[in-house]
Image (tube, rainbow, N blue to C red):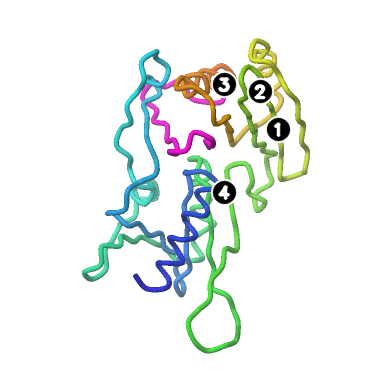
């Protein structure tokens, strides 16, 4: 693998740990932004049916559709595999990013943009992350005030943080599990666009059922039973 794909996938691994699994990483190659995928690399995601998560029996993971295939379908674009390389690619002109940004964010994706740096020096192009867009943080569109909610699970205690990157407003408070319905009434006043969940490493096997029951009770997750949920292998972080 040459230097550019190596940088791309190293950054992807780093960004998964920072932003969760719903990440699209776009790299500038000349006048285009490209999205890449290695089809033979094991996926760190597990996908569950929401209906299974809300039953008493332990669910089994379903198949995972790679992000590149989800994005290609969403934007009606074609995936190619140049030459004999196994690397899958899709892309669009750099000027088209604003056109697709809203569509991707509305579907819950976090978008990492890697741009070419203007150095004035000859030699290979240098690149670095220039922008990060998420459903709750798109500073180029401030028409509506959006919030992210962070929920920390520790035994029967929940630590809640509600924050908006658009105006810096935040509130933090603890709540006991038995009082969780009070939070649902509070959330009516906030436009929650993103949910981050931290779980104590000693949580039991039923924690996923507990999490999704809570999200549905707070009206933070769709009620459709066929919705699929993607989860990291590590039980400590979920986005």
Q: Which residue is mark 1?
A: 162
Q: Which residue is mark 2?
A: 158
Sequence order check: which comes first, mark 3 or mark 4?
A: 4
* Residue shown at the point (39%, 44%) measured from the top left: 44
* Residue shown at the point (31%, 32%) measured from the top left: 62
Distance between the alpha carbons at the discs numbered 2 and 4 = 22 Å
| Foreground disc of the pair 3, 4 | 4
Instruction: Count all numbered tags in the image, as a single digit.
Output: 4
Sequence order check: which comes first, mark 3 or mark 2?
A: 2
Q: Which residue is mark 4?
A: 18
Q: Which residue is mark 3?
A: 219
| Foreground disc of the pair 4, 1 | 4
Q: Classify 10 Å Cα crowding around label 3: few (below 14), some (14-19), many (20 and above).
A: some
Nearer-the-camera pick, 18 or 76: 18
Which range of residues does the magenta coloring cover?
A: 220-239
Report the residue that reaches farthest toward the left.
84
Distance between the alpha carbons at the discs numbered 4 and 1 = 18 Å
Sequence order check: which comes first, mark 1 or mark 3?
A: 1
Distance between the alpha carbons at the discs numbered 3 and 2 = 17 Å
232 inside magenta stretch: yes
Q: Position of residue 76 (x, y in %)?
A: 35, 51
Q: Classify 10 Å Cα crowding around label 1: few (below 14), some (14-19), many (20 and above).
A: some
């Amino acid at each position: 693998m040459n230097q550019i794909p190596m940088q791309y996938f190293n950054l992807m691994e780093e960004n998964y740990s920072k932003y969760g699994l719903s990440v699209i990483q776009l790299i500038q190659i000349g006048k285009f932004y490209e999205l890449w995928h290695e089809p033979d690399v094991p996926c760190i995601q597990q996908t569950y049916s929401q209906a299974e998560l809300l039953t008493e029996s332990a669910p089994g993971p379903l198949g995972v559709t790679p992000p590149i295939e989800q994005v290609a379908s969403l934007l009606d674009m074609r995936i190619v595999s140049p030459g004999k390389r196994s690397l899958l690619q899709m892309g669009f002109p750099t000027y088209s990013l604003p056109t697709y940004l809203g569509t991707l964010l509305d579907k819950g994706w976090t978008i990492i943009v890697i741009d070419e740096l203007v150095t004035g020096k000859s030699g290979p192009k240098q690149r670095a992350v220039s922008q990060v867009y998420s459903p709750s943080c798109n500073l180029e569109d401030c028409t509506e005030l959006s919030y992210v909610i962070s929920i920390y699970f520790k035994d029967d205690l929940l630590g809640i943080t509600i924050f908006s990157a658009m105006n810096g407003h935040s509130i933090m408070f603890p709540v006991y599990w038995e009082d969780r319905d009070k939070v649902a009434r509070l959330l009516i006043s906030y436009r929650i666009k993103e949910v981050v969940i931290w779980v104590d490493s000693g949580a039991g096997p039923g924690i996923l059922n507990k999490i999704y029951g809570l999200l549905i009770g707070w009206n933070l997750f769709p009620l459709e039973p066929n919705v699929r949920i993607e989860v990291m292998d590590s039980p400590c972080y979920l986005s």
